[in-house]
Image: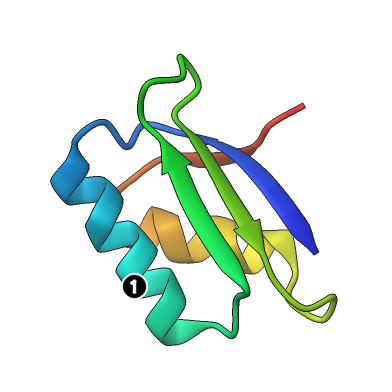
Amino acid sequence: MIGIFRTNISSVHDKNSVISAISKNFSVQACSVDIEDCDRVLRVDAPENLEEQVIIEFVTRLGFSCHILD
């Protein structure tokens, strides 16, 4: 699964916290947040059995908005 999400993550501190939390809680090959992009794009590269909705709910519990980027 390669998930591409629109978020409201805007600071380097928040970006690092979210990436760290995702990496610790899920088996991901790569995770990044582009805070320079207008959609604050979160990209998660993970095994196929990880569903996008799980990432959305996890990031939301961290206090950020997270939606699949169309």
Q: Is residue 61 left or right of residue 49?
A: left
Which type of secondary structure does the marked residue at label 1 adopt?
helix
* Most distant residue in the left direction: 13
Residue 11, located in which quarter of the rendered image? top left
Q: Disc 1 residue type? A: Ala
What is the x, y in percent for residue 60?
41, 54
Are there few (<14), some (14-19), or many (20+) residues within 10 Å of tag 1?
Answer: few
State the residue position of label 1. Answer: 21
Q: Is residue 18 left or right of residue 48?
A: left
Q: Identify whether 28 is placed above or below 3.
A: below
Q: Residue at x 44, y 43 (%)?
A: 33
Q: Nearer the viewer, residue 2 or 61?
A: 2
Picture quarter with the N terminus: bottom right
Q: Identify whether 16 is placed above or below 20.
A: above
Q: Identify whether 26 is placed above or below 36.
A: below
* Most distant residue in the top direction: 38
Residue 30, located in which quarter of the rendered image? bottom right
What is the x, y in percent for residue 5?
60, 40
* Most distant residue in the front direction: 29
Q: Residue at x 14, y 48 (%)?
A: 13
Picture quarter with the C terminus: top right
